[in-house]
Image (tube, rainbow, N blue to C red):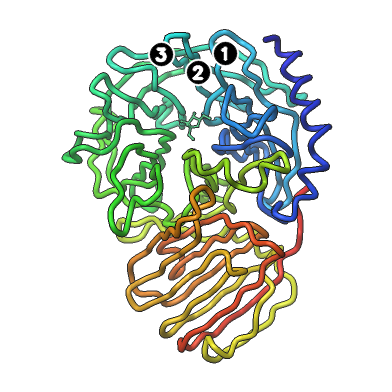
Amino acid sequence: MSEAHLLKQALRAVVSGQLRASRDPHRPAWHLAPPVGLMNDPNGFIQFNQRYVLCYQWNPLACQHGAKFWGQWSSSDLVHWQHEPLALAPSESYESHGCYSGSAVDNDGVLTLVYTGNVKFDDGSRTAWQCLATRDERGEYRKLGPVLALPEGYTGHVRDPKVWQHEGQWYMVLGAQDLMLQGKVLLLRSPDLHQWTLLGEIAGSQLNGLGDFGYMWECPDLFELDGSQVLVVCPQGLAAEQWRYRNTFQSGYFCGELDYENAHFQHGEFHELDHGFEFYAPQTCQSADGRRLLIGWMGIPDGDEFFQPTKAHGWMHIMTCPRELTVAAGRVLQHPARELQQLRQQEVRFSGSADSLPDLDIDSAELALSIDGVCHASFADTLTLDAEPQGITLRRHNLRSGEPEARYWRGEVRTLRILCDRSSIEVFINDGEAVMSSRYFPDPLPQLRFSGSAQIALRHWRLQQCVI
Ligand code: FRU
């Protein structure tokens, strides 16, 4: 379909649907959400000429997955975002079934997108092209077409290029599935973003002593932080265990050391990045002041998503808040980006036993707590959090089946920082040691009630609305 036609369809969908979407009481006050339609992965996250650009996988035409566009926002401070014209529409034959996920780089002053052109065939098979697009001074993207076809030895599932520069060369990691149906991460090198050489598989199922570790690995991201190299990736097909891997698909990281010359990544164990119900396909960028920032999709492509009530208002899914990463003792720590403190309104403090605390307004709020003992927190009777000596449990009822479901984090709980935004919570445990992100759909608007014998010292802030 021609680009002009696709853009017209998208524009019509936004103009006719955005009022209904904006009136949804579950619409976030300060998290990013699509104006209409279904949003998934963050893409092309970069700070360029002092402005953050964040694109996203987007089907503006319906609340379902399909031939994805790239929507686009920008911000000077990670808090106040503005919608920008759509970046990519799947108009060309090499991307006929979607401009799939990818990243952005600053190529000598030119903002360049590297993304996957996804093509499906009638017999159910597919292929993938890694493609380029550049942004001009007027902010318009021009597609340069494919620069890499499917490498030999892999199925049509090769996608999600994340590109960075190292010692004068460009490097790319790609998520891939080999012909034995094992998930892998490929490392490639290029002098100019156009000619790519496959250096090898740096991680994957059946590699580096991992054993069977999923049939496809999506959305890899590789960066250096605090003296360690971190590979973030989303393996699909890990079996659920008692305390971990409870979501349909996982998202986590390996810390290690990358040998660029031999394409070898010596890494430690896989750790989940988030222990909540909804988190997937995160992407990072480096800010001008040297911080490694991460934004994830607060969703999972598992089918249950279509039972979320926002679908009836014509929009689905939100991004997580921007997070700052650090590495200590081989583990990634996550903290809400410091810029978010701008949203805080008047602070209220409480302390005492959990049973004695008043109900709190958590429509759009931040809480910082220290906890000593056992406590139960009920978010509008829809989602509960139990802090016990052995860890944290989040519970809710599955939107599709109505069955109770739970997610866990195991460890000693000392402090919690909880960010609430109408239909989401993000719980940062022990100063970033772990995070649990989840959607929930309270009706009417949310209140938080504590009970239990724990001694709690709590700070509470209402957060200002700031999403357009
Ligand atoms: C992850 C993912 C990516 C793909 C995109 C398509 O959620 O499946 O692998 O590029 O979403 O929307």
Residue 396 at least partly seen: yes
Q: Which mark is residue 289?
A: none
How packed mark 1 is, by other alpha carbons closer than 10 Å (few <14, some 14-19, many 20 or more), is some
User: Residue 377: horizontal and vertical position, in percent?
Assistant: 53, 75
Which residue is the site of mark 1? 96
**Mark 2 and mark 1: Cα distance apart in space:** 7 Å
User: Residue 130: horizontal and vertical position, in percent?
Assistant: 48, 18
Q: Are marks 2 and 1 in contact (CB under 8 Å)?
A: yes
Q: Is residue 163 depicted above or below 292 in this figure?
A: above
Of residues 55 and 342, which is closer to you in this image? 55
Which residue is the site of mark 3? 125
In terms of sequence position, does the residue under pointer 3 or pointer 1 come before the other?
1
Q: Amino acid at mark 2?
A: Asn
Is label 3 within 8 A of ligand 1 (CB to nearest ligand atom)? no
Q: Viewed as shown, does residue 312 lie left or right of 248?
A: right
Residue drawn 78% across and 32% down? 14
Query: Which of the 4 image quarters holds residue 65?
Result: top right
Residue 227 at least partly seen: no
Q: Nearer the viewer, mark 3 or mark 1?
A: 3
Which residue is the site of mark 2? 118
In terms of sequence position, does the residue under pointer 2 or pointer 1 come before the other?
1
State which quarter of the image contains the N terminus: top right
Residue drawn 27% across and 15% down? 153
Residue drawn 71% across and 70% down? 462
Of residues 78 and 71, which is closer to you in this image? 71
Is label 2 within 8 A of ligand 1 (CB to nearest ligand atom)? yes
**SS for dot 1:** loop
Q: Is residue 217 depicted above or below 286 in this figure?
A: above
